[in-house]
Image (cartoon, coloured by chain):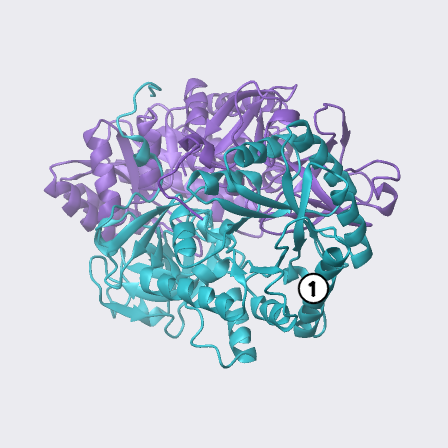
Chain colours: A purple, B cyan
Amino acid sequence: MFDASSHPLEGAALHKGLPETGNDLLAEVSLPAAVIHEAFLAHNLAWMQRFANEHGARLAPHGKTTMAPALFHRQLAAGAWGITLATAPQCRAAFAHGVKRLLMANQLVGEANMAIVARLIDEGADFYCVVDSAANVRQLARYFGAREQRLQVLVELGVDGGRCGCRDQDEVLALGELVDSEPALVLAGLEGYEGVVYGEDPVRAVRDYAWHLVEAAQALDHDGLIEARAPLITASGSAWYDLVAEVFREARLAGHFVPVLRPGCYVVHDHGIYRAAQRDVMGRRPELDRGLHPALEVFAQVLSLPEPGLAVVGLGKRDIGHDQLPLLLRRYREGGMANRTLPVEGWRVEKLMDQHAFVHVPDDDFPETRNGEVRIGDIIAFGISHPCLTFDKWRRLCRVNERLEVLEVLETCF
Amino acid sequence: MFDASSHPLEGAALHKGLPETGNDLLAEVSLPAAVIHEAFLAHNLAWMQRFANEHGARLAPHGKTTMAPALFHRQLAAGAWGITLATAPQCRAAFAHGVKRLLMANQLVGEANMAIVARLIDEGADFYCVVDSAANVRQLARYFGAREQRLQVLVELGVDGGRCGCRDQDEVLALGELVDSEPALVLAGLEGYEGVVYGEDPVRAVRDYAWHLVEAAQALDHDGLIEARAPLITASGSAWYDLVAEVFREARLAGHFVPVLRPGCYVVHDHGIYRAAQRDVMGRRPELDRGLHPALEVFAQVLSLPEPGLAVVGLGKRDIGHDQLPLLLRRYREGGMANRTLPVEGWRVEKLMDQHAFVHVPDDDFPETRNGEVRIGDIIAFGISHPCLTFDKWRRLCRVNERLEVLEVLETCF
């Protein structure tokens, strides 16, 4: 029943979601499909770049969120200074698609990963990674020294009970001295991540942490340990970037230091945790204009209406992030733009399996022979949270206009 | 900072995990990496095929689990009758890799998905899908009738409170009559899925459901509604396949009906929910030899030891299924085969972020300058549950021998 030598379809045909530019999303694209709305995407790209500019900071959006080179290009074209990434293979993928400045906001561990980076440096990448231990500094110095290469590193400052990073300024300075003593390493500045800072008053905890970053960076600089002419200071995810930017601005870092912000999720935003976080940002900063819009949705079809109250939809954990249940946004009829805004009273997502979502539909909307609110083949647009764990389900996403025509098929590089 | 026209690396270099055949997993492969142990894989392939044979059933392993054509080929070479899949794009991917008999254990909804299947049928696929509503039967009849094609369908029987499927035999027979009246459709048998059957006594509930399947299939056959010469009757996931096989055998279906079992996870098994389910199978069937072995692991490295008690590992939700936290299995030193079996007292995975795992390590094992039990760069093998949501994180997996040399790089088609 098989013949391994026969490949009647082309390589591009092998993966789910095979839309083409010009397709009508509601009639011509195999669903489920991940969809990015151009108007909101363009708005978010411009909004965050303007935010960074107004705070005298550079933007290095975290690319791990999307791993979509076409979006990296949009971010860079909008004015980004570089792209942040989390692993050596992610850096390789971004560089292969023309991104020259790579900020790996993570430790570089393992000779196979170091080999990837050594090649990127050879080929001209402006690469930075993070260190937080003497052991790793020595591993890197040995590896890159043996190849007569120089590796740019940032010392990481974390917090007690947090994730990676030195736990205080003394550790930062001691590690800075060790880096300074290793000819293969160039100390380029300081890195942190406020997304793992917690406290009873989180705003205060994040601001305090940002000030610790400033002081540690200034101490490294004061001790003459930073080799780079324009030392970097960088932090910020997608929830507290406003506080980090504010502290960097208050500290008047720009001019000598290069402050770099690294939010990732902003580019498509979301309908859950980051929407809530952004509401807090706008509450703290009422002078900011409009804010971000959720731009990423997943469209899927009703497969079955097997009993009153239940619509089974062809959308599962294989298609959408499942830290939170997806949200119901709109219901379309296949082939037509007319839609009904969801959720209406009583509609809710109850469960997600690998390939199916269970949507509760009120008895009044069921079966399809009654009021016709739901039919087999109906298309539902779902909202997501958070975007990172939805992007990595897709090798291709559809960028669409307001008529839901496919403007571009975006490839991902996970 | 970017140049979209420059692609200094080849296409294959763009995605995470780029191992090569012959690589030493512990020294030459960028980690994290997903790993399949050949000895356990071979055992599982043979074990489940023998189980099906001994019960007079055919095996159509669920391919959605792995979406790895090389594993489909192994399953077919071991004697499988066909491959089960969940969506039209999955069927397209399997067919493109030489799988000719495709059992889509799901509803075929949406014209774009029907178009994929129409092309597969044109190209010679022996394709089956499932129906559970008059609306869908009419959609399919219209679409395939307009193309002068005939589509083989199975009526689905579900359960109240379950997922898709007719809710009783009367609905099955009514739908069977409708299929029979549509010239474009061929009724080929009956399908069910016992994985959504619940009850106080689940063994009894699953057996009862399997008997309902038998009776419904026999009723369809008795009424002359099944057009296929050898009608199919098919059910079973990876948890209750023994009960389904037992009932199909007790009903003496083989000879006229073709009983088809569809477990998917068995091929690599797991360290969590399916291991527990298999323990139950072995408890119910003590005469069965040995059982299945977990064959899929994810290897990752310690990135940071920032404070007593905490090892941060480069393994996240981007790399491994996270319905359950991954399990600690073994700790290696980079480059060497010597290892320590985990978890030892006090070691446990506490949290998973997108790209990081937090592993609690007892203070005695920390810092690395103390007893040396954990160092930056140490490699930890993690066990997973369940496999479907780990496979879909990877475009390439490493099949390894007992010396952890890469025997083959398996591509996936998600």
| Residue A66 in sight in this render | yes
Left-right relation of A371 to A66: right
Picture coordinates of residue A393, whole percent (x, y): 50, 41
Which residue corresponds to the image point at 59% horizontal and 65% vertical from the top-left?
B254
Examine the rendered structure and indicate whether residue A409 appears above or below residue A345: above
Q: Determine whether the residue tagged by mark 1 lies in a helix, strand or loop.
A: helix
Residue furthest to the bottom: B286
| Residue B308 in sight in this render | no
Examine the rendered structure and indicate whether residue B396 appears above or below residue B403: above
Residue annotated with mark 1: B214
Which residue corresponds to the image point at 40% horizontal and 29% vertical from the top-left?
A60
Picture coordinates of residue B327, whole percent (x, y): 43, 64
Q: Chain of mark 1?
A: B
Residue B283: image quadrant is bottom right
Q: What amino acid is found at the position of numbered circle 1 in the picture?
A: Val
Left-right relation of B54 to A286: left
Left-right relation of B217 to A115: right
Residue B377: image quadrant is bottom left
The residue nearer to you, when weighing B337 against B71, is B71
Which residue corresponds to the image point at 40% horizontal and 65% vertical from the top-left?
B46
Picture coordinates of residue B199, whole percent (x, y): 72, 69
Which residue corresponds to the image point at 15% horizontal and 39% vertical from the top-left?
A184
Q: Residues within 10 Å of mark 1 (few under 14, many from 20)?
A: many
Picture coordinates of residue B63, whole percent (x, y): 49, 51
Q: How many numbered marks appear? A: 1
Quadrant that contains the N terminus of chain B:
top left
The residue nearer to you, when weighing A6 against A180, is A6
Examine the rendered structure and indicate whether residue A341 appears above or below residue A408: below
The residue nearer to you, when weighing A160 against B32, is B32
Examine the rendered structure and indicate whether residue A30 appears above or below residue A136: above
